[in-house]
Amino acid sequence: MRLLKFEGENFVFRFEKIDKQILFCLLRRYPACSAPLTPETMKEGEVIGPDLHLLEASLEEQRVGHRKQVEAILSDEGRFQEDELGYRFYLTEPQIDCLLQILNNISVGSWLQLGRPNPQMGKGSQITEKNIELAWAMDSARLFQSELLKALRQKQEFQ
Amino acid sequence: MSQTAEPPVLPEIQEKTIEQVDPGYLVICWDDPVNLMDYVTHVFQQVFGWPRQKAEEHMLQVHHQGKSVLIRESMEKAEHYVHQLQRYALHATMEKAS
């Protein structure tokens, strides 16, 4: 996946066929986590700050919107245009922001399920045959996120 | 000609600024090992409308110092910002400013 060009309000990405397959496999994993991100040391019931019930309601509302976005991408409503090299994938800036959040949910959710590995603190993840899919999902989601963020940066520098 | 009356001497009243009366709440973002640095910058831009440079400065503060105080606001607005940051899966909290 890489940015091809800006076309009106759209960012146009070059997708190889395998990129599309990987993205679709990833998106089917959404949502990978449903609770707000809290530090490992936080005890159950400890207050984050705002009303946790309101926050959870807000997150649920967000998930409904994101699920619709995921379904729209998976149903391929004109966002992918096939050509001899693979696909051109069209996204507007708000759609990129939404896709970034979806991919981040998959990345964070996979990381939580892997036991919150933190190599900088000497806490590596134990990769096994059972959890290797989680490690793959976390890294793949981050790769797509990196390309989307790079495209946003390029647009800002271009303006 | 009547004499002008001397104004009464009032005790000195210490003026308090709005911040002293209501110091408000601090919105804090904490470091985590999972969110990409560029993603954190993007979120700060989206949530606060900051230019890239300011968002990057706060992102680097989070990364190097473990946390960054992003903004001081009223309780309602601070709650709103914490919600927004949590919606992006950042670890954000609020605390009463002193």
Image: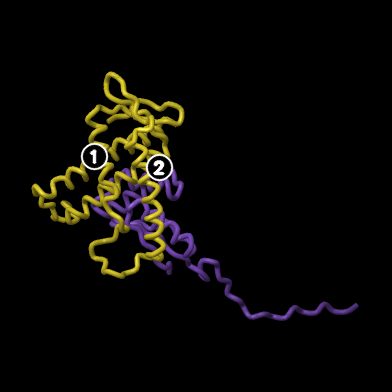
Question: Residue at point 37% right, 26% down?
Answer: A5
Q: Amino acid at mark 1?
A: Cys
Q: Quadrant of the C terminus of chain A?
A: top left
Which quadrant would residue A22 be assigned to in this image?
top left
- Secondary structure, mark 2, is helix
Q: Nearer the viewer, residue B43 or A108?
A: A108
Mark sitting on residue B52: 2
Which quadrant would residue A39 be assigned to in this image?
bottom left
Left or right of B75 in this view: A56: left
Which quadrant would residue A112 be assigned to in this image?
bottom left
Picture coordinates of residue B32 (x, y %)? 26, 54
Left or right of B82 in this view: A127: left
Closer mark to the observer between disc 2 and disc 1? 1
Question: Residue at point 30% right, 57% down?
Answer: A37
Subunit of label 2: B
Instruction: Name the residue at the right extreme.
Output: B1
Please tell me how crowded label 1 is: few (under 14), some (14-19), or many (20+) other residues with Cα within 10 Å.
Answer: few
Residue A38 position (above or below residue B54): below
Question: Residue at point 28% right, 18% down?
Answer: A84
Residue for badge 1: A25
Which tint was used for chain A? yellow
The purple chain is: B
Please tell me how crowded label 2 is: few (under 14), some (14-19), or many (20+) other residues with Cα within 10 Å.
Answer: some
Q: Amino acid at mark 2?
A: Arg
Q: Quadrant of the N terminus of chain A?
A: top left
Q: Nearer the viewer, residue A107 or A67?
A: A67
Q: Label 2 to label 1, Cα distance in Å? A: 32 Å
Picture coordinates of residue B42 (x, y %)? 37, 44
Subunit of label 1: A
The reply to whether the C-beta atoms of the residues labelled 2 and 1 are less than 8 Å apart is no
